[in-house]
Amino acid sequence: MHTYEAHPYKAPEPSGFAEVSTTPPLHEVEAERVGLTDTASHHATTDSYVAAPEAPAAVPNAGGGIFPDQLPADQAMPDPSAPPAAGWESSARLNQNYTFDTFVIGQSNRFAHAAAFAVSESPANAYNPLFIYGDSGLGKTHLLHAIGHYAKHLYPSLRVRYVNSEEFTNDFINSIRDDEGSSFKQIYRNVDMLLIDDIQFLAGKEHTQEEFFHTFNALHNHQKQVVITSDLPPKQLTGFAERMRSRFEWGLITDVQPPELETRIAILRKKAQSESLNVPDDVMEYIASHITANIRELEGALIRVTAFASLNKQQVDLSLAEVVLKDLITDAGGAEITAAQVLATTAAYFDVSIDDLRSKSRTRTLTNARQIAMYLLRELTDMSLPRIGQELGGRDHTTVMHAVRKVSAQMPERHVTFNQVTELTNKIKQDQRQNR
């Protein structure tokens, strides 16, 4: 591992980026909340800011590898011995389960992992910004949190903030509504490392993009680290101004691919170990051979098998796995499962309407049905947490996260929950096969 000489963290003088716009009216930005903007009807924003200078050339890596071997003289590292920044532990919003130790490395993600590790070791000096793209459920969010955790471990005084695009949008809109624009800027421009997830959901949100544009400029110009994830590379993002896409390309762009068989098996072993599950190798190989595209569905299949065994006091073996997963494992040619399909099937199963699922009602029946719908949307589709919340009445992504965790925890313990999830999954998969 490379070592660096510690220096007090000192930002250079800002230059080159001038804001010439004013705060937009509240009624114009309210429509940009997640769930209210039809991104397909929007176009890239008009450039209304003073043009920024080109990004500085990257410092050559003397060692030839991915880790930087030499830091520019004017780019001092944060002081590792400095005390933690007051108040920034909670605002970092980091998931304690997502660290480099719990991340399984394979050929599909090795370069992205190495780049993420390098950024953690040398914030704003390795690759800035770091842009990671790939399909949902492949570990991008895990890497974001891992970067934040390890960077704070190395540099306790580092001010880190993780945020997804939904939270950024809502924070921006709320700051305008509450006339707290300066507070918003203090929060987002006073960090040393900004980790922003699912940037693609800012597409078409003109005012929010402009604010992020300035936030990005302010951070980059002060040599603060920015890490961004997306489902597509910058050049393929639609609904973004060219000036925004070009900034995404200033640093390093890397991707994560669906895991190969060996990595899928390793992921299952790691999951079994973390959950203290006793699962034979042939069962893990069976699951890994049939669930190929999504890590969430892969781990969900493992939990389903072990939950069934626990509820029925049976040993986990291959024959049991084949029975439990027979309707989960479908031909690769099956039609894509949609949110509409999941919600319609769930509503019919619980004898409620889709409007009921989306309503604010918190009766026991509706709450249970809604949480199971959230779990199924997370397991059976590639939808992000914010998008699932949007489908269920505009709920916050943390509500969805709570529902997914609750249902997952109940499955090995409650026959009713296990049967509801299994029967709904089977019905949805059967409809999927019929729609081929």
Image (spheres, rainbow, N blue to C red):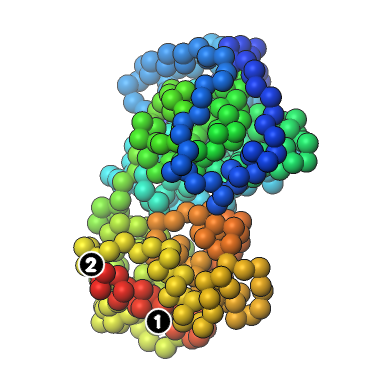
**Could you tell me which quadrant the N terminus lies in?**
top left
Q: What x and y, as percent, mark residue 392?
A: 55, 63
Q: Quadrant of residue 165?
A: top right
The tag earlier along the polypeptide, 2 or 1, is 1
Q: Which residue is located at x 60 percent, y 81 percent? A: 365
Assign a secondary structure to mark 2: loop
Decide: is 431 above or below 397: below
Q: Which residue is located at x 38 percent, y 15 percent? A: 60
Q: Which residue is located at x 54 percent, y 11 percent? A: 73
Decide: is 302 above or below 57: below
Q: CA distance from mark 2 to mark 1?
A: 21 Å
3 or 134, nearer to the observer: 134
In the rendered structure, the answer to whether residue 171 lies left or right of residue 229 reads right
Decide: is 337 above or below 116: below
| Residue 237 in sight in this render | yes
**The disc labelled 1 sits on which kind of residue?**
Glu
Q: Which mark is residue 423?
A: 1
Q: Which residue is mark 2?
A: 436
Q: What x and y, as percent, mark residue 186?
A: 72, 31
188 or 263, nearer to the observer: 188
Mark 2 or mark 1, whichever is nearer to me: 2
**The disc labelled 2 sits on which kind of residue?**
Arg
251 or 169, nearer to the observer: 169
Local crowd size for mark 2, using a 10 Å CA cut-off: few (<14), some (14–19), many (≥20): few
